[in-house]
Image (spheres, grey):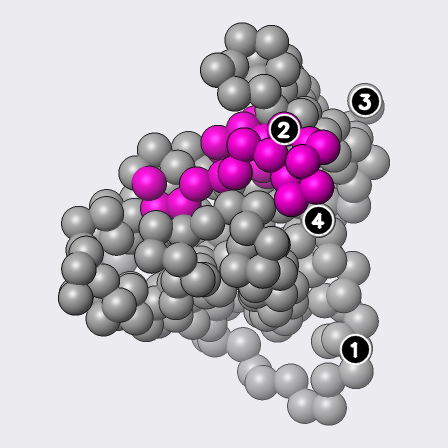
Amino acid sequence: MPAVRVPPYLVVLTWISALLAVDRMIGGAASRAGEWALGAATWVILVALARREAPLARVQIAVVVAFATLVEYTFSAGLGVYTYRHHGVPAFVPPGHGLVYLGALDLGRQAWLRAHALRARILTATAVAAWAVWGLTLSPTLDVLGAFWALCLVVFLRWGRSPMTYVGAFVIVSWLEILGTATGAWHWAPWSPTGLVAQGNPPSGASGGYCWFDAAAIWLGPLILARWPARRAPHPDAVAEPAADPVVAA
């Protein structure tokens, strides 16, 4: 009987949920050791899933990890735009960004979703717009940053090079942010460091901000791969390079 292969996006969603649950339980003297253990486990899962990806996707994952880590240390550890429960940048965060990108990429290439590409894009744009309006009007905390990022997501969905990946990013990142802030793994400051921009906890359109990571990977990945002196052969079960997103009327 052939083995059933679990789609990577389901692995990512499951691990995010489990990781945040465990992170909430550890504390005191065990918190640092537990954090490093979660980080090591996240790296193992990322590498295992990435080995089954095509070379281009593996390079894109590396770009996201590098870009996102720089952002984390600048805006969290440096400026305090958001802070983690144990402060600093937890060990599981850099590989976690790689998993989020891989999950978004995998969800966006699912045949059942791509068969309804236009509907998926419209539904995603509608959902993030409604969330942004709520953040500006009904939310206990005014959320201007979320509205700006929601606009970014809508723009990426309409004109981006890989809109179905952005649909996937909306699902994965929204789940991550809602669960992460609900469990207290991190907390967004009410205002930006300048004191000029109100922020939700989480910002309503956080996935729109994350789309910039995706855009960097989609842009830089092919450039890096084209200059790689010797590419490692993909895993025998590697997923083929995804076809271009369906061309749909918008």
Q: CA distance from mark 3 to mark 2?
A: 32 Å
Instruction: Give, as a three-letter code, the residue at label 1.
Output: Ala
Residue identifier under label 4 = 212
> In what quadrant of the picture does the N terminus appear?
bottom left
Estimate the x, y position of residue 217 in percent, counting from the top left. 69, 60
- Estimate the spatial distance between the alpha carbons at disc 4 and disc 3, rounded to whole Å: 22 Å
Q: Residues within 10 Å of mark 4 (few under 14, many from 20)?
A: some
* Figure check: 151 above or below 103: above
Of the residues under marks 3 and 2, which one precedes in the sequence?
2
Does any portion of residue 31 appear in the rendered image?
yes
Q: Quadrant of residue 176?
A: top left
Residue 151 at x, y percent in the picture:
74, 28
Q: Which residues are magenta?
A: 184-208
Q: Which residue is mark 2?
A: 198
Are dots 2 and 4 in contact, CB under 8 Å?
no
Q: Compare marks 2 and 4 and give the one earlier in the sequence.
A: 2
Contact (Cβ within 8 Å) of mark 1 with mark 4:
no
Q: Which mark is residue 250?
A: 3
Magenta-drawn stretch, dominant element (helix, strand or loop): loop
Residue type highlighted by circle 2? Ala
Identify the residue at image location x=40%, y=57%: 87
* For discs 1 and 4, the disc positioned in front in the rendered view: 4
Q: On the rendered image, what quadrant is the C terminus found in? A: top right
